[in-house]
Image (cartoon, rainbow, N blue to C red):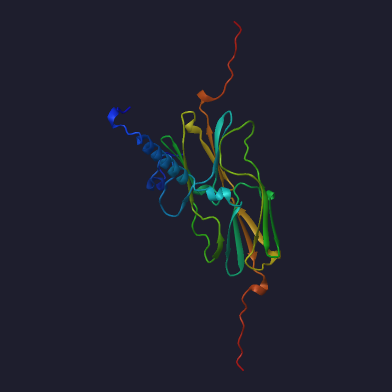
Amino acid sequence: MNLIRWENTDPLEGFTHIQREMGDLIDFLSSGSKTEGYVGAEFPQMVVSVNKDNVIVRAEIPGIKVTDLDVQVADDILTIRGERKPNMGEGAVTYLRRERNFGTFARSIMLPEKVDAEKVAASYKNGVLTVTLPKAAEKKPKQIEIKKS
Amino acid sequence: MSNTEHPVVKKKKLAPDRCIVTGKGDWYYPLSDIYETPDNFTVVIDMPGVSANNITVDMQSNELIVNGEISQEAYTDEKLLYSEYNIGHYHRHFILSDAINRDKIEAKMSDGILTIILPKAEHVKPRKIQVKEA
């Protein structure tokens, strides 16, 4: 406990203290979890990339059974649907902290190129779904031979 | 569970209440749930993309430190068109109280989810007290 001499107390002194506390609080809230984008954004989060032959779509969906996932391609729309079940232990549990989301989700994205829907392959490893969509044949660059006449 | 510091842990400055980490690659703060059952506390952490052998769980004094590393070789000869998440390592740490039996902590990894089971110490477990007839 600090002793403060009576004549030194400024009535506004208290406000600078509050201001500092609020500043600290705002700093703390904005620095803590860097996942605001994750929670607010659409689930699952996706990365779309292309290489020479394929369009590759990756989605972070940790902790889902492959049987609960449904991947469909129609024309150039890829739809990922699924259900993430709450990770319940057996018996009565009391949650102390809850940041992870669960429930059903569905998300469709438009693919950047025409793909061959018959040859789409999907794999799930370490919580990341990877869908490999081979580009449709007519979209691949075709080398044209130049004949000398 | 060993007491030796993981090399990554050594390199980093750990602030007590927030995650400030430096090192190779980006670091992310994974989402986690904590729940309590009569015998255990369970911490569930989402770490998509990390395999079981790239995870380290360390006890350092009273801190439980979880690091998940991701190999950075992804996206070779691919052109990224659209990216909603970045690839990076995960780090999170928790302060444990005396209510936890530290010798019996277990961790398992499946499908990008790390589950850490922290058994309660005997003295905090609920127990029935026998009522004797006097």
Q: Position of residue A61 (x, y in %)?
A: 60, 50
* Quarter of the figure with residue A101: top right
Depth check: give the residue in front, A13 or A142. Answer: A13
Residue depicted at 46% across the width and 29% down the height: B98
Residue A89 is at least partly visible in this image: yes
- Residue at screen point 56% across, 42% down: A99
The extreme bottom residue here reads: A149
Considering only vertical position in the picture, is A114 above or below B2?
below
Q: Can you give x and y, in whole percent of width and height, for residue A52 in the image?
A: 58, 70
* Residue A38 placement (x, y as % from top left): 55, 50
Residue B45 vs B23, above or below: the answer is above
The one of A76 and B97 positioned closer to us in this rendering: A76
**Residue A80 vertical position relative to residue B123 in the rendered view, above or below:** below
User: In the picture provided, is A80 more to the left or to the right than A96?
Assistant: right
Q: Residue at x 62, y 78 (%)?
A: A142
Percent position of residue A128, x then y? 59, 53
Is residue B67 among the parts visible in the rendering?
no
Number of numbered labels in the structure image: 0
The answer to whether residue B110 is left or right of residue B23 is right
Q: Quadrant of the C terminus of chain B?
A: top right
Front residue of this view, candidates A143 and A79: A79
